[in-house]
Image (tube, rainbow, N blue to C red):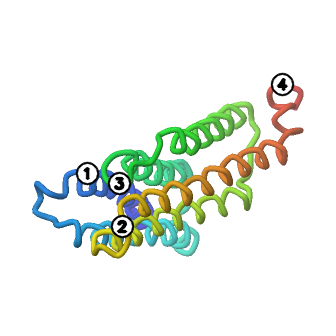
Amino acid sequence: MQIALILTLTRIVLSPIFIVLYLFHEPWGISLQWLPFILLLILGISELTDLLDGYLARKLNQVTELGKVLDPMADSITRLSIFFAFTKGIVGLPIVLVLVFFYRDSFISTLRTVCALRGVALSARISGKIKAVIQGLTMLVILVAMAFYAFDKITLVDFQKLSFYTVLIAALYTLVSGAEYLWAHKNVIKKAWSGTL
């Protein structure tokens, strides 16, 4: 199996590990003080594989149709899994914020698939890449803040407020990036939908 594809699959496998450790760290004998550092390690490995898989695929001439499908899917699975997990446990995010990420990704992915079936390729936008970076930084901020909470440097209320407002900012930009994507491709989408291409 190609190394780039292995890295992509690794990212998918790490998602449930992150969730299980976050939600059930006590039965596994992991203290709250250790938890954020373990989760940061998993997140770091996941983000590193995200950077490397595309780079290695191009460098080693291993770009495949499967890889083109799995890479963005792995990104969505990873980020959505973590954000949904954060609606439980000590983070306690409102699920409505996470649903913004879910519906935006689902809508854009479905739209790209439908257009592709009609012979139209919708290219990625820089706003989408910025969205991914912002979401990654949001998870990082939450885990760093969790470490501060675990060592009694901030209260649970302050930790949850910080998490909420950080995710709120990410959710608002996620909506903006989705709107920008639709606006940038509006003419092509309209033609694909009407079948006039």
Element carrying mark 2 = helix
Which mark sits nearer the N-terminus, 4 or 3? 3
Q: Which residue is mark 4?
A: 195
Asked if the residue at tag 1 contacts the one at tag 3, i.e. Cβ–Cβ closer than 8 Å, the answer is no
Q: Please state if 112 lies on the left or on the right of 12 as rendered.
A: right
Q: Please state if 163 lies on the left or on the right of 191 as rendered.
A: left
Instruction: Please give the name of the residue rendered at 47% of the width and 43% of the height, measured from the top-left corner.
Output: 94
Q: Amino acid at mark 3?
A: Ser
Which mark sits nearer the N-terminus, 2 or 3? 3
Element carrying mark 4 = loop
Query: How far apart are labels 4 and 1 at the CA level?
Result: 48 Å
Location of residue 97 in the rendering, given as x and y in whole percent from the top left corner: 54, 44
Location of residue 182 in the rendering, given as x and y in whole percent from the top left corner: 78, 42
Q: Please state if 119 lies on the left or on the right of 196 as rendered.
A: left
Query: How far apart are labels 3 and 1 at the CA level?
Result: 12 Å
Which mark sits nearer the N-terminus, 4 or 2? 2
Q: Amino acid at mark 2?
A: Met
